[in-house]
Image (cartoon, grey):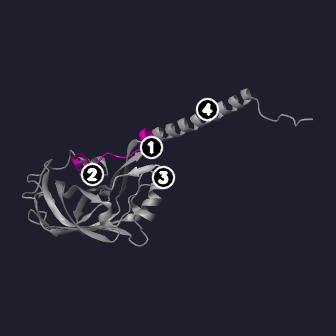
Amino acid sequence: MTDADTSVPDAPRRSRLKWILIGAVGVVALLFGAILLYAFVLNDSPDELDVDDLSDALVATVPAPDTVADAAPSSTAPASTTADPPEDGAGGDFDGDWTPTDASEFGYRIDEVLEGISTTAVGRSNEISGLLTIDGTTATVVDVEVQIDSITSDSALRDGRFVGSIMNADEFPTATFQLTEPIDFGSIPTGDEQVTATATGELTLRGVTNPVTFEVTAQTTDGRIGVLGSIPVVFADYGIDNPSFGQVRTEDDGLVEFVLVFERAA
């Protein structure tokens, strides 16, 4: 008497293998589809800050009239025979100290590759403090500080890693920039005019300070000063590990970018 044959017939075995392969292909397709959805739909990274953002930030800080009466003079009021003197700063007198407003933005920009698909990670904050001092056409002091845990992107997961393992905000809660050489803009820009100059200073990230030199663009609107710039950053120079994780790969460098809007210090 022989043992019963318990082997699975070839046809059912081939059918089972086929469905396993179909299932695996389906999982890969769903994963790739999710990556495409994130890269091209859900990843809402803003464009790199530029001169238009500088102008928009300055305009956004212009106070709107409280009432129609504030916006236009009453028809019964006597006409003024002399023009009012220009507001301090609006007529070319920018000497003195200035502080950042919440129309400012400061953050990072890093190119990512997610399963072969290029995306961009952008985090920004408007919680910025500091001081700008102007003497004639020269900025003699620029001292800016941003709270690391206030910098956010479109991904809570990314933000958690940024303030945690990447920047260690508990130990190093701020990023700072300090000017080390005066910036001579040559002239005070008026109207829609923008002037460009070179800034030299020290950037501190994760407790490490390095000298940096980069271009800045300045504009003035209604007694406010706006400054645009970006600083290339090599992560290793600041003791920052490459922020790649999981399926997300990054380069070894990125940008610190900013638009700073200043008002006269109280």
Neighbor class of circle 4 (other Cα within 10 Å; few <14, some 14-19, many 20+) is few
Q: Name the residue under label 4.
A: 22
Q: How many labels does the image show?
A: 4
In the rendered image, residue 40 lying in the magenta stretch gets the answer yes
- Which of the two labelled residues, at mark 3 and mark 1, occupies the earlier sequence position? 1
Please state which amino acid type lies under the numbered disc 3: Gly
Q: Distance between the residues labelled 2 and 3?
A: 36 Å
Measured Cα–Cα span from mark 4 to mark 3:
25 Å
Nearest to viewer (mark 2 / mark 3): 3
Q: Which of 102 and 66 is in front in this view?
A: 102
Marks 2 and 4, how far apart at CA: 53 Å
> Which amino acid, mark 1?
Glu
Residue 142 x, y percent position in the rendering = 20, 67
Left or right for 178, reference 17: left
Q: Earlier in the sequence, mark 2 or mark 4?
A: 4
Position above or below: 43 against 162: above
| Residue 57, label in figure | 2
Q: Which corner quadrant of the image does residue 186 belong to?
A: bottom left
Pointer 2 or 3: first along the chain: 2
Question: Within 10 Å of the Cα at label 2, are there few (<14), some (14-19), or many (20+) other Cα atoms?
Answer: many
Q: Dot 3: few (<14), some (14–19), or many (≥20) neighbours within 10 Å?
A: few
Give the magenta part as a residue range.
Answer: 38-54
Residue at numbered disc 1: 115
Residue drawn at (40%, 62%), measured in percent from left and top? 150
Q: Which residue carries the number 3 mark?
A: 246
- Taking 105 as reference, is 153 left or right? right
Mark 1 neighbour class, 10 Å CA radius: few under 14, some 14 to 19, many 20 or more: some
| Quarter of the figure that contains the C terminus | bottom left
Instruction: For marks 1 and 2, give the one nearer the viewer.
Output: 1
